[in-house]
Amino acid sequence: MKKFALGMAALTAIAVASPLSAADYPDRPVSLMVAYSPGGATDFQARIVTMVAANEEYLGQPIVIINKPGAGGKVGWNNFASSSKTDGYELAAYNVPHFIAQSIKFKTKYSIDNLEPIANWGADPAVFVVNKDSPFNSMKDVAEYAKANPGKLTVSGAGLFVGHHIAYLQIEKALGNELKYVPHKGGAPAMKSVLGGQVMAGVNNLSDAYRSRDSLKILGIADLNRNEEFLPDVPTIKEQGFEVDDSSVNFRGVMVRKGTPQDVIDKLAAKVPEMFKNSRVAKQMKAGGSPLRVMTRDEVKAMWERRQKFLTELLAGL
């Protein structure tokens, strides 16, 4: 009888300690860590694409945004990769090329090897912007000033080795003259420094620039083609004679830590992309000038691997 009681107690303890099955997951709100400031493009879009999470056809529970900005994303992603739980209740927003480039250039606690993608919601190209009162009206104007004043043209961006910085490095190389990069804690403060006149120019996200377009001049897009949906009249930087490609386009999506149960990953991978396709989400993203590009887990895994190889080669040359 004593052995039976001990056995039942052990079984009870195991049952209590066992992780929640995917059939019951999630049974409480889920958090999504954003490694950038409130109000920036990643934060703005994350709040839109998760707003229908509580609908029964998706997760049936709300997703709560938690901002952990600093060092171009390194603060939040280092914390997530080293101390977040692997039970499916702590997710993070990823930015590519940001976290991949940083893992190549710095000693970080994160890389594509210890993170698991769930789905991608958008692809946001970088743009070169100036205050509406700036004398610059084209990238040619910028190039002429940089040539006459090497190292004096200040350009804001959201940290080091994020999409903004990679676009900046390409622009500086293409112009053939030294500029001065001024890193910020995110796209929102980087944009404010342009609007407030603290810097002469900025490299920012198309979506942030689109929402502030009445106070800015958007001189060029760091992509292979114009953005016909939001900025059809803004030429690419390459169109203007400067060799800048699409290496800095900012892919955004959701990830978990490696070690998260596979059945939980599979459920998220099935539900989250459908959530991103919701008509309310699409309408709000378009209203905010935010390009939507939904990709599945397998598509994101392939994209991560391609970008890892590409960025390793690109950054070695920058």
Image: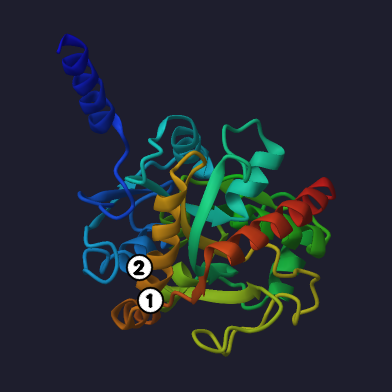
Image location of residue 259, percent across then percent down? 49, 38
Q: State which mark lies toward you, 2 or 1.
A: 2
> Of the residues shown, which amino acid type is indicated by label 2?
Val
Image location of residue 85, percent across then percent down? 38, 35
User: What residue do we see at 83% from left, 60% from top?
Assistant: 176
Image location of residue 34, percent across then percent down? 40, 49
> Of the residues shown, which amino acid type is indicated by label 1?
Met
Q: In the image as oriented, which residue stretches furthest toward the front?
A: 1
Q: Who is closer to the viewer here, 204 or 261? A: 261
User: What residue is disc 1 on?
Assistant: 285
User: What residue do we see at 47% from left, 76% from top?
Assistant: 292
For residue 46, side relative to residue 8 (left or right): right
Q: Is residue 149 visible?
A: no
Q: Residues within 10 Å of mark 2 (few under 14, many from 20)?
A: many
Q: Who is closer to the viewer here, 64 or 90? A: 90
Are circles 2 and 1 on residues that touch, CB within 8 Å? yes
Q: Residues within 10 Å of mark 1 (few under 14, many from 20)?
A: many
For residue 184, side relative to residue 98 (left or right): left
Spatial CA span between label 2 and label 1: 8 Å
Image location of residue 125, percent across then percent down? 59, 70
Label drawn at residue 49:
2
Q: Is residue 228 visible?
A: yes
**Picture quadrant of residue 170:** bottom right
> Could you say whether the residue bearing mark 1 is in a helix, strand or loop?
helix
